[in-house]
Amino acid sequence: MGEGSVKVKEIMSTRVVTVTGDTPVPVIASLLRENRISGVPVVDAGGAVVGLVSEYDLLARSGETASEVMTASVITVSEDTEVEDVRHLLVERRIRRVPVTSGQRLAGIVSRGDVVALLTTEWVCQVCGEAARGQHPPARCPKCHAAPDRFVMQDPCPGD
């Protein structure tokens, strides 16, 4: 990808709800509901990701603790992974979220919603007012050919 590619660390959520392997299933279900999330990483004492419990896991598997119902083969990415690579993972693997690690420790999480939010990023040319959507301002304004540094990020309208 090009120089200006967006990295996961720029869009990831760093306040991640986590559980440990011995967390009871009813507690996990409450955490998902209260936080309006659909899955939580399972971490060990050192903060390393050892699994993930999703709503699907709670419905499809029986067990009393996170370690008994979790998906143990979790795909993770590093903070410097390009968002475009994460987008491909989310689509090809049909997953909803990817834990982000720094070394062995959990650093954040990227969801489909985080990636979709980039699609709403709008740039406006300060010279002519032309708008363009994308992760980055265009290389040149399609209307007046102004340089990318003449674009400012437009705040999304409420409800967009």
Image (cartoon, rainbow, N blue to C red):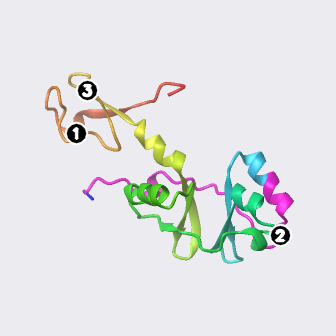
For this orientation, the residue located farthest to the left is 145
Q: Is residue 87 left or right of residue 159?
A: left
Residue receiving disc 1 = 148
**Which stretch is magenta?**
2-30
* Crowd tier of the residue under label 2, counting other residues whose Cα lies within 10 Å: few below 14, some 14–19, many 20 or above: few
| Mark sitting earlier along the chain (3/1) | 3
Residue drawn at 49 percent across, 56 percent down: 90
How much space separates mark 3 and mark 1, taking CA atoms? 10 Å
Residue drawn at 72 percent across, 77 percent down: 45
Which x, y percent locates residue 128?
Answer: 21, 22
Residue receiving disc 2 = 63
Amino acid carrying label 3: it is Gln
Q: Which mark is residue 59?
A: none
How much space separates mark 1 and mark 2, taking CA atoms? 54 Å
Q: Quadrant of the N terminus?
A: bottom left
**Which residue is more in the foreground, 140 or 147?**
140
Q: Quadrant of residue 15?
A: bottom right
Q: Quadrant of residue 127?
A: top left
| Mark sitting earlier along the chain (1/2) | 2
For this orientation, the residue located farthest to the front is 60
Which x, y percent locates residue 96?
Answer: 57, 54
| Mark sitting earlier along the chain (3/2) | 2
Residue receiving disc 3 = 126
Provide the secondary structure element on which disc 2 rests. loop
What secondary structure predominates along the stretch shown in magenta?
A: loop
Up/down of 35 relative to 160, above or below:
below
Amino acid carrying label 1: it is Pro
Q: Tell me, yes or no, if residue 154 can be seen here.
A: yes
For this orientation, the residue located farthest to the top is 128
